[in-house]
Image: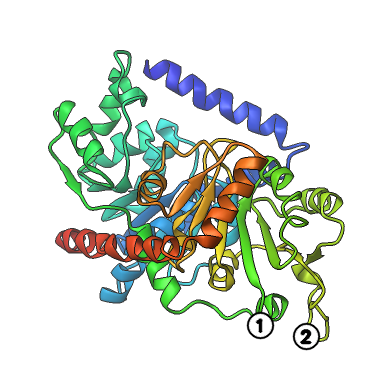
Amino acid sequence: MLWLYNFGIFLYKIVVTVASAFNVKANLFLKGRKNLLKIIANKEFSKERPVWFHFASLGEFEQGRPVLEELKKNHPETKVIVTFFSPSGYEIRKNYTLADGVFYLPLDTRKNATEFIRVVRPRMAIFTKYEFWYHYFKTLHDNGIPLIIISGIFRPEQAFFKWYGGFYRRILGFVTTFFVQNEQSVKLMNQLGLENVELSGDTRFDRVAENALAPKQLPLIEAFCGNSLVFIAGSTWLPDEMLLKDLFQQFPDWKFIIAPHETNAAHIQEITKMMPTAIRYTQLNTETSTVDQQVLIIDNIGILSSVYQYGKVAYIGGGFGTGIHNTLEAAAFGLPVIIGPKYDKFQEAKDLLKLGAAVSIQSFDDLSAAFIKLQKDQNAGITAKNYVVEKTGSTAQIIKYLENYI
């Protein structure tokens, strides 16, 4: 099975190389890894024995960020390096000030893993939620370096729990400790004979709760909203936007803010064609009159988590694709949420639905009905916020454990 895994990594590199000629993300993926191990070696991290945090992308970074920042707060002298697999994480956080180095993760080959661990010599490695790389995990294990998974979540349909999953279960065996989000994950791991599992919940709750207490103020957004009730659609994709475009005329007394997941010029242009009366965030200025504008498109990145403070109801995108995005950022501000049908992988979404603080939809009629329902429901937003507050505390539990290795 290992040969098949290695071949898959090799094939993946070929595909990315070909795609890099016409795909921006693929080009960044490839370019960012050029001579990377030599660049890292020149930093001489091995002398410092840094703590290594790895994140698949931006979402996982925000999820694990509370642990990283609390660790640096308690031990400012400790060196930290951060790696990303995806350009969407690296390109946004490559200048993150609390890290002593931010890099792409070299592809998971035996040679890359051996060299990376040799030149970094981390005192421990912390992976957030997903990504199980055989060679990196084995090399850490062989070198006696603790490997901790935080905010992990496991489901019966994953390969680890299938009859053919022996190779994948072997990867899990290299992990020192798992901190998982729910009881189901604990039970599944125990069924595999893994007892090094702690139920900690999700560190995202700590992150979003902290953000809601002191959000970044956005005067241009505030001016756009005025005294109107505001519907905020966050991390949307085209199928979401095609539903939302018909909602504006039905509710002329509301203002709408659309924050697409992809903010490249082509997609923004696609949205503006569907919503010709909308104004873009980068077009706003202190002299712009937005009183008569009903729809605002956020055409930059990094502010959505603070935009939610101005909303009354939220729609979270992705539910008509591979899965919904972050519902907790909105819930932390007391916004009930509307989501698409694909939410099964997200415990918080299932919890919010059960509590009546979220509604799942499959069509425009569902969307309209859900919006009307949540406008009238005075308790849904309060329930959403209370849910977030009650789930905080994961970071403190993990930090207490990590102290053993600092």
In the visual, does 287 lie left or right of 97? right
- The answer to whether the residue labelled 1 contacts the one labelled 2, judged by CB atoms less than 8 Å apart, is yes
Residue plotted at (36% across, 24% down) = 157
Rounded to the nearest angstrom, the CA distance separating label 1 from label 2 is: 9 Å
Residue plotted at (82% across, 48% down) = 270
- Give the farthest residue toward the front: 376
Q: Position of residue 375 (x, y in %)?
A: 55, 61
Sequence-wise first label, 1 or 2: 1
Where's the N terminus, which quadrant?
top left
Foreground of the two, 296 or 45: 296
Where's the C terminus, which quadrant?
bottom left
SS of the residue under disc 2: loop
Amino acid at dot 2: Thr
Residue linked to disc 1: 219
Quarter of the rendering containing residue 76: bottom left
Foreground of the two, 131 or 314: 314
In the visual, does 323 lie left or right of 285? left
Q: Position of residue 259 (x, y in %)?
A: 66, 58
Near mark 1 (Cα within 10 A), the count class, few <14, some 14-19 or many ≥20, is few
Residue linked to disc 2: 286
Residue plotted at (78% across, 54% down) = 268
Quarter of the rendering containing residue 232: bottom right
Q: Position of residue 61 (x, y in %)?
A: 45, 56
In the visual, does 212 lie left or right of 180? right
Near mark 2 (Cα within 10 A), the count class, few <14, some 14-19 or many ≥20, is few
In the depicted structure, whether residue 220 falls above or below residue 159: below
Residue plotted at (56% across, 49% down) = 370
In the depicted structure, whether residue 117 falls above or below residue 405: above
